[in-house]
Image (cartoon, rainbow, N blue to C red):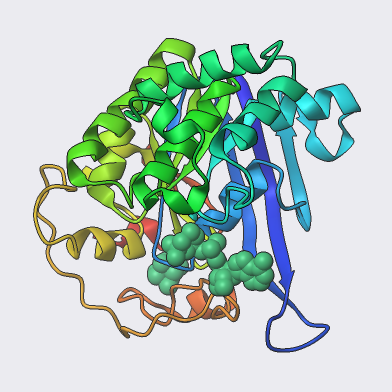
């Protein structure tokens, strides 16, 4: 079943530098999230991954296009459906400090959604539920964490608390934004394995946002990979196929830049010389194909016409000249 469908999504924000002007951060995003599937979302810093994640969970209203949850446009849900959506689609935020109220204990923050949504009948039951998830995410003994304030915990502990918070409301989809970046390497695999278990046990779908291709590959073993560049998805494919056989010139270059073979499949990629190493700003992307200033396969058409994400050899890529690229 398709849980979330994103069609022609655009997000614009007020410009930070020029008053009254808008900057487009996301453009023409099309993506669906099936029940139980894992999608890894990768791309360089500033390309719009967090913005897309926050939009999926309902924190930013679409400036253009439509997001549907269980077949209904999220801007047209009645109160009950909206609550179902907001509870069903959870986010584990990249910035764990900003995501927790500094003036409340962890228990006060995390018990609130459980009580408000009648997942727990009373505080005792809320505590029991949270103890269970704290144990799952390796925060033991739970009482050492439940009654602390966010600033009394480390970044890694806060990230695990956010994961426990997301899991505790029994969601259908979790958008996990760099959820293990602050966690010690020794715990990373355990947390990723926990997400895999939750995915298999409860069929929770995961959108896993990361910079790191090796983690993406590990997390989304049988899932899909979406590659973003300057606010657009440029490649979308089954993850193994995508990494073993990248098709979009940008993704080819990204894979070629991975220093060891951890993120890579069987293919040995040659370095791809880029036309320019300068990364344009997402606030002011180049015209046409936004990769054209750096793409080694650039032709005149690339500057004039924006390529749409289209089917190509079993996956999807946004490039005019896919057929001609070796
Ligand atoms: N609320 C906002 N108002 C204006 N601009 C914003 C806002 N939020 C994000 N941006 C801009 O949107 C762009 C994309 O940001 P975003 O945080 O989505 O990128 P990202 O891919 O998650 O990056 P990172 O990998 O560093 O986390 C950035 O240029 C950022 O400055
Ligand atoms: S459309 Fe042109 S510039 Fe863009 S990736 Fe394809 S060849 Fe390169
Ligand atoms: Mg981010």
Hey, which residue is sitting farthest bottom in the picture? 18
Q: Nearer the viewer, residue 297 or 87?
A: 87
Residue 114, placed above or below residue 322 = above
Quadrant in which residue 141 is drawn: top left
- The percent position of residue 186, horizontal first and vertical second, equals 17, 39
Q: Quadrant of the N terminus?
A: top right
- Residue 50, above or below 126: below
Q: Is residue 77 above or below residue 233?
A: above
Q: Residue at x 86, y 22 (%)?
A: 80
Q: Residue 283 location in percent, x, y? A: 60, 78
Residue 92: tell me if it is visible. Answer: yes
Callout count: 0
Percent of width and height locating residue 198? 41, 19
| Res. 319 visible in picture | no
Q: Nearer the viewer, residue 265 or 94?
A: 94
Whether residue 160 sits left or right of residue 50 in the image: it is left
**Coordinates of residue 294 in the picture (x, y in percent):** 36, 79
Pick whichever, 12 or 271, lies toward us. 12
**Quadrant in which ligand 1 is drawn:** bottom right
Left or right placement of residue 256 versus residue 51 in this view: left
- In depth, the one of 171 and 45 nearer the eye is 171
Q: Quadrant of residue 35?
A: top right
Where the C terminus falls, by quadrant? Answer: bottom left
Identify the residue at image location x=70%, y=49%: 59
Which residue is drawn at the image coordinates 32% and 28% (left, top)? 138
Name the residue rendered at 68%, 88% in the picture: 17
């Amino acid at each position: 079943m398709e849980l979330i469908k994103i069609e022609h999504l655009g997000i614009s924000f007020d410009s930070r530098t020029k008053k009254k002007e808008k900057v487009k951060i996301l453009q023409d995003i099309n993506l669906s999230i099936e029940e139980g599937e894992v999608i890894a979302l990768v791309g360089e810093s500033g390309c719009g991954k967090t913005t897309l994640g926050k939009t999926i969970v309902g924190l930013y209203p679409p400036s253009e296009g439509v997001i549907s949850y269980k077949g209904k446009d999220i801007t047209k849900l009645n109160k009950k459906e909206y609550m179902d959506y907001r509870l069903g689609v959870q986010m584990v935020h990249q910035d764990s400090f900003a995501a927790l109220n500094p003036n409340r204990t962890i228990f006060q923050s995390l018990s609130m959604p459980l009580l408000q949504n009648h997942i727990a009948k009373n505080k005792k039951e809320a505590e029991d539920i949270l103890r269970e998830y704290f144990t799952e995410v390796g925060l033991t003994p739970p009482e050492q964490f439940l009654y602390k304030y966010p600033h009394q915990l480390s970044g890694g502990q806060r990230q695990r608390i956010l994961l426990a918070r997301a899991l505790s409301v029994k969601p259908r989809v979790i958008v996990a934004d760099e959820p293990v970046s602050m966690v010690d390497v020794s715990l990373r695999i355990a947390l990723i394995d926990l997400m895999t278990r939750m995915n298999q046990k409860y069929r929770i779908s995961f959108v896993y946002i990361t910079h790191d291709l090796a983690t993406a590959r590990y997390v989304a073993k049988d899932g899909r990979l979406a590659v973003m560049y300057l606010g657009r998805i440029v490649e979308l494919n089954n993850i193994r196929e995508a990494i073993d056989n990248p098709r979009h010139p940008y993704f080819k270059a990204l894979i070629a830049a991975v220093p060891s073979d951890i993120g890579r499949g069987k293919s040995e990629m040659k370095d791809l010389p880029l036309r320019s190493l300068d990364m344009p700003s997402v606030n002011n992307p180049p015209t046409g194909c936004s990769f054209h200033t750096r793409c080694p396969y650039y032709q005149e058409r690339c500057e004039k016409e924006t390529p749409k994400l289209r089917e190509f050899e079993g996956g999807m890529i946004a490039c005019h000249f896919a057929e001609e690229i070796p």
